[in-house]
Structure formats: structure tokens, C-alpha cells
């Protein structure tokens, strides 16, 4: 099987309900492409032996999806996915499939997304694996799905333009992620440079993670001139299973 680079997501800040779009949950796991006898990550790492549950036969297809591990307080747990990726075979996983690139050994990337969704549904019914599931999606009603994502503490959702094709290896504005950020006031306890990393604590003094991405020029300048401890506002993709902020970014130094 030739390795295909997956299509990547653009970004959208606001939540909308637009005609001509479908919306689906954004799961927090590992992007994976799965075919009859092989699976691999978006970076081309072969994972077939790590995830034998995802091996199937009888269908000459290539499926795009997200490998996830169930969480305690959410439907997905990124740390669990990484644990399985790193060799923990006791960690249960599944694939949430959202697209199909090859169907009956022929490329379907030039088909509109709604047709690919139909082919994906048909293929999964034939594969009939308890480990590979179809991602749910809705037409137009982005705001309604967003409320469900927030209630279930999920990472966010993805909007996809109807009629759009699959463009491998390209970050397209036809696919847009909307992140369910959480916001916190926390304390900077330590700053290191080259590379820049900011250690964060709760107001009560408990270590809750480090910020290493998303620094604006203004934030970088202030971090260079201040001595901890001091208060900052951050946004993150919620909390991981270890009780740490997931990918925190500093918004403001208070």
C-alpha cells in the first residue's frame, strides 16, 4: 500500500450553523490511516503491529480516522492513546473513521465529501469491526453539535464544506477545526529559555503543566523582563488524565 499524507485542518474561531457544511466531533487522539493490512500515522510511522485490532480483510480500502482511548470524564483520553502507541497493549483503543480515500482499490479523493461519507458507511458495514466506528455528523446544525461537545468535555468539532474533495497533505480551509478551549488564571512559577518554556501552578501551588507554544511577541517580551511568581491567564484544551492542563497557551500576563 502506498502511504498517503492525510488532509489537514484549517482553523475557525467562531461557532456557526452554515448551510452547505457538515459538522462532526473532534476527538483527541492520534490521526491514523488504516487499510486492509496496514495502519500508519500522519507522519508515515507504520503502526500495524501496535494496533492489531484494526487489521481487517476483504475490503480494498483506505480509511482516515482518529485512534482514541476512552477517558474517565470524556469520550477520549489523549494520554491513553499515547500510552498504547508507546507499547501498552493493555490499553483498549478504537478507530473513529471520518473519511475514505480508496474504495474497491480505486482512489475516491476527487469525490465530494458527502459521497465519500456514503462509501465509508458502506465499507464499515462490510468490515463489521467492533474497533472501527463511523464518526457521527450533522448537516448545518453546528451550534447544536457544539453544545453537545461542550457538555461532554470534548476537544471541539470540525466543519467540512459540502462538495469538497480530499486533498492529501494540504491544510485546507474546506476543513475547519473549532477548539473547545477552557480558560484559567494560574501562576507562573518558573521560566526557562532556548526553548521558551513556562512552568505553571494553580493558585494553591500545585504544578499543573507547562506552556511551550503559542507565545505572542508581546508575551515573549514580558516573560523576558519579569521574575516569577506572577499571575497569567491561559487557555488550554482541557485537562489530561494526569490532572495537567492540555497544551496551555498564555493569553495575558496580569
Image (cartoon, grey):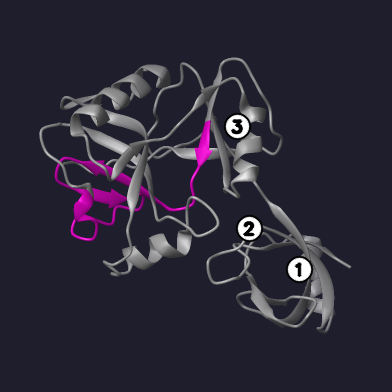
Answer left or right for 231 relative to 180: right
Dot 2 or dot 3, earlier in sequence: 3
On the image, the x and y values in percent for residue 249 come to: 69, 61
Query: Mark 1 near mark 2, Cβ–Cβ under 8 Å?
Result: no
User: In this rendering, does residue 99 appear at all?
Assistant: yes
Q: Which of 177/141 is in front?
A: 141
What element does badge 1 sit on? helix
Q: Which of 25/176 is in front?
A: 25
Image point 48% across, 46% down: which residue?
Answer: 27
C-alpha gap between disc 1 and disc 3: 36 Å
Image point 16% across, 24% down: which residue?
Answer: 104
Q: Which of 128/34 is in front?
A: 128
Quadrant of res 10: top right
Report the magenta residues as a range: 24-53
Q: Is residue 243 above or below residue 55?
A: below
Q: Which residue is mark 1?
A: 220
Q: Is residue 133 above or below residue 40?
A: above
Answer left or right for 218 relative to 160: right
Q: Which residue is mark 2?
A: 238
Q: Which residue is mark 3?
A: 145
Q: Is residue 52 magenta?
A: yes
On the image, the x and y values in percent for residue 227 come to: 83, 84
What element does badge 3 sit on? helix
Quadrant of res 150: top right
Q: Specify few, some or many for label 1: CA neighbours under 10 Å numbering under 14, 14-19, or 20 or more.
A: few
C-alpha gap between disc 2 and disc 3: 18 Å
On the image, the x and y values in percent for residue 185 come to: 80, 66
Q: Is residue 123 above or below residue 203?
A: above
Q: Specify few, some or many for label 2: CA neighbours under 10 Å numbering under 14, 14-19, or 20 or more.
A: some
Image point 14% across, 45% down: which residue?
Answer: 37
Amino acid at each position: 500500500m502506498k502511504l498517503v499524507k492525510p488532509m489537514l485542518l484549517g482553523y475557525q474561531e467562531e461557532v456557526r450553523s452554515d448551510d452547505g457544511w457538515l459538522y462532526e466531533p473532534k476527538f483527541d487522539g492520534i490521526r491514523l490511516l488504516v487499510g486492509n493490512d496496514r495502519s500508519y500515522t500522519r507522519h508515515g510511522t507504520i503502526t500495524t503491529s501496535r494496533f492489531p485490532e484494526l487489521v481487517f480483510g476483504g475490503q480494498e480500502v483506505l480509511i482516515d480516522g482518529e485512534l482514541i482511548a476512552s477517558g474517565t470524564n470524556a469520550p477520549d483520553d489523549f494520554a491513553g492513546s499515547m500510552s498504547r502507541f508507546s507499547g501498552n497493549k493493555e490499553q483498549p483503543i478504537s478507530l473513529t473513521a471520518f473519511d475514505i480515500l480508496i474504495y474497491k482499490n480505486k482512489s475516491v479523493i476527487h469525490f465530494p465529501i458527502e459521497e465519500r461519507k456514503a462509501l465509508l458507511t458502506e465499507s464499515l458495514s462490510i468490515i463489521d469491526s467492533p474497533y472501527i466506528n463511523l464518526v457521527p455528523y450533522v448537516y448545518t446544525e453546528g451550534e447544536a453539535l457544539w453544545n453537545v461537545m461542550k457538555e461532554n468535555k470534548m476537544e471541539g468539532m470540525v466543519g467540512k464544506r459540502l462538495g469538497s474533495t480530499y486533498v492529501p497533505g494540504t491544510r485546507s480551509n474546506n476543513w475547519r477545526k473549532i477548539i473547545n478551549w477552557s480558560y484559567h488564571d494560574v501562576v507562573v512559577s518558573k521560566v526557562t529559555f532556548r526553548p521558551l518554556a513556562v512552568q505553571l501552578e494553580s493558585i494553591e501551588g500545585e504544578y499543573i503543566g507547562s506552556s511551550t507554544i503559542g507565545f505572542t511577541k508581546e508575551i515573549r517580551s514580558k516573560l523576558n523582563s519579569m521574575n516569577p511568581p506572577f499571575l497569567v491567564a491561559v487557555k488550554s484544551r482541557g485537562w489530561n488524565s494526569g490532572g495537567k492542563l492540555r497544551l496551555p497557551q498564555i493569553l495575558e500576563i496580569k
